[in-house]
Image (cartoon, grey):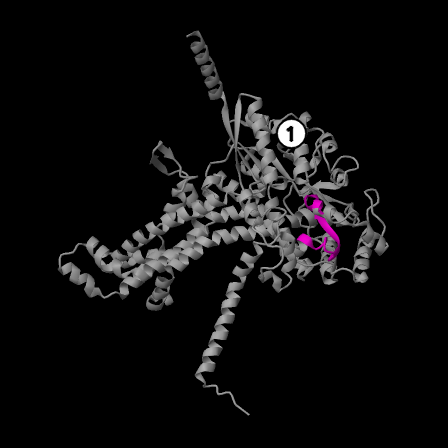
Amino acid sequence: MSVIDPSNRGLQLATRYVVLTLIAVIFAFPLVFMLVSSLKPDDQLLRDTASLRAFLPVGDLSLQNYYAAFDRAPVGTFILNSVLVTGVTVALSLFVCSMAAFAFVFLRWSGRDLVLGVILATLIVPFETIAIPLLLVVSKLPWIGLDGFSLGWLNTYRVQIVPFIADGLTIFLFVQYFKDLPGDLAEAARVEGASNWQIYRKVVMPLAGPVLATAAILKFLVMYNQYLWPLMVVQEEGRRPVMVGLQYFFQLNRAWGEIMAYLSMITVPVLAFYLYMQRSFIASIASTGVKG
Amino acid sequence: MTRLTAASALAMLWATGAMAQTELTMWYHGAGNQVESEIVNRIIADFNASQSDWVVSIESFPQNAYNDAVVAAALAGDLPDILDVDGPIMPNWAWAGYLQPLPIEPTRIEAFLPGTKGVWNDQLYSVGLWDAAVALITRQSTLDALGLRTPTLEEPWTQEEFMGAMEAAKASGDYEYAIDLGMSDQSEWYPYAFLPFLWSFGGDLIDAESGYQTAEGVLNGEAALAFGEWWQGMFTEGYAPGPSQDPADHASGFQEGQYAFTWNGNWLALPFLEAFDDVVFLPAPDFGNGNFIGAASWQFAVSGTTEHPEGGAAFIEFALKDEYLRDFSNGIGLIPPTPTAAAMTENYAEGGPMAVFYDLSEDQARLRPVFPGYPVAAKVFAKALTDIANGADVADSLDTAVDEIEADVQSNQGYGQQ
């Protein structure tokens, strides 16, 4: 009778892969359900939820739910708005927050620790608590645009972007990362006569790839999933983002297939962005304080 | 030259006319509902073409996001001229200044169902182009198989008969549950659909005689306790699925034979009629103090900040034409507010498959408490019902609900109704 040797390397490897595969399947199930359900008519979709058929592309499959979703709501406009608002906010946020972090780590100025402490303290303030005061402010802010002077930022892209450019978490991520960089690099550049801007641009930022990826992904997720704020400040359909658009599908008679089709479509930009940044994101988690 | 001058004069006249038109903005809760949007847009186009004083432009919002958007806009001072409001919420918005009285002659809506008139503090604030109703829905073959009497408006089921029907359905073994109460829909459905049961037991959400200042004695008195015990029994005895009900079961369970009865709204009745040819819509049972259903659906109003209430009223009055009431009813299955419009519809004309809902609405409908604290009280009531359905102590849950409602009333200085 043969005995299985628990120290067998092949067996350990196989066990590890089985466990990891099982975990991956569990995490993939909701996504598979969403994609598969988006291809099914409502009656079949609801019937299938009682069995494993819910995760299988079987039965009457078609793209009808996708066509219907486009008929029900301007899906393309919503996705475009979200991508635009998210993209611009992420880009500006990385620039502004990294410069702020640079000032906290590489420059000497009085009150630096106090200001950083105050910024970090904002991490514990939920957005909901400042939403209404912020609404009152943005509804009265002046603006000079192509059509002249105006008061109030409601129903614009900028009202969805500007309040979220600077945030405590992104500054914190950059500060933590910059602290781990060798201080000699900046000092050497300074001795060579480099200005602060040159040190920031030519010495520090080229080394900041991993934290840029991490901050970008986290910011992207926050911005792309915005619901409360755009609901409060945007009344025009043409400026609404995807999460507000999702509500178009929750009518009294809910069309679950269309909901799944819409969710599948709005998930694509998120997955694409994550896959693009994946390598740097993992490198950042493995090499910085982000891992906690 | 003469021709050119005449053309210029005409163009100037047209331009002057166009400039004289005042733009009115309107917000509507129906984004994502293509049928509703098509009808509303047609009414607006007809109105804009029918006169030269006003031009209405619409912005539609998804229903679930609508109330929050209106409240945010009110805070920012950015309300539109015309907006629609869910009937029971109207007093709150009127009290908060989001709405102003609607300058429409009462005679214009004399024939309308009571639930479609949004009156608060003796003033008309809103008018509905439809109403909704709830009924006890089943199949005639089910009643026959279970040996049950068919209840009528004149002689609805008593509590004993209703519970007998529940027991008969359960004992037959043919159904997963005797009745679908729609417990998965944890929204305004709870107060809308279940408050009538409390009324029928003799209780209420808040004491109207106190000027809507207290719920003591009506939400936790003997009648309310009896209601609470009965309510809890519906779940502990296994007659109905509780708050954890799968929404999919609620959506299709009746058609698939999981439930013998469903307590449901007329807006969901069309699929039942398509599924079975012997569907019957029964009146609410009488638990001892009359039989009731909730009234009031979405209604049109003018905002508290508009400088043109007469323009808003002109549009709303225009929308009250029978042909539009008919189109809404045919399009989304809701109850037309006038008998003349009902007679023009496919489903509510005499002999129509849903005509009974018009009678139910006329005979049984009762407005949810018309006071500004309703939105909070409704949420508190829904939570108490959920807790009781989940097995919480009935008296404690109702006492807690009373305390929470009173705390809200006090923190809002009695909503100005003392």
Is A11 magenta? The answer is: no
Measured as percent of width and height from the top left, residue B175 is found at 76, 59
Q: Nearer the viewer, residue A183 or A77?
A: A77
Measured as percent of width and height from the top left, residue A147 is found at 36, 31
A118 on left or right of B17:
left
Helix, strand or loop for disc 1: loop
In the depicted structure, whether residue B84 falls above or below residue B290: above
Residue bounds of the magenta highlight: B251-270
Q: Quadrant of residue B292?
A: top right
In the depicted structure, whether residue A9 falls above or below residue B163: below
In the depicted structure, whether residue B87 falls above or below residue B197: above
Is B264 magenta? The answer is: yes
Residue B157 visible in image: yes
In the depicted structure, whether residue A42 falls above or below residue B351: below
* Chain that bears disc 1: B
Which residue: 48% across, 86% down?
A6
The residue carrying mark 1 is: B320
Residue A109 visible in image: no
Q: How many marks?
A: 1
Query: Where the N terminus of chain B falls, by quadrant?
Result: top left
Q: Nearer the viewer, residue A289 or A33?
A: A33
Query: Where the C terminus of chain B falls, by quadrant?
Result: top right
Within 10 Å of disc 1 (Cα), the crowding (few <14, some 14-19, many 20+) is: many
Measured as percent of width and height from the top left, residue B239 is found at 75, 59
- Give the residue type that dot 1 points to: Leu
Which residue: 52% across, 71% down?
A22
Which residue: 70% across, 34% down?
B337
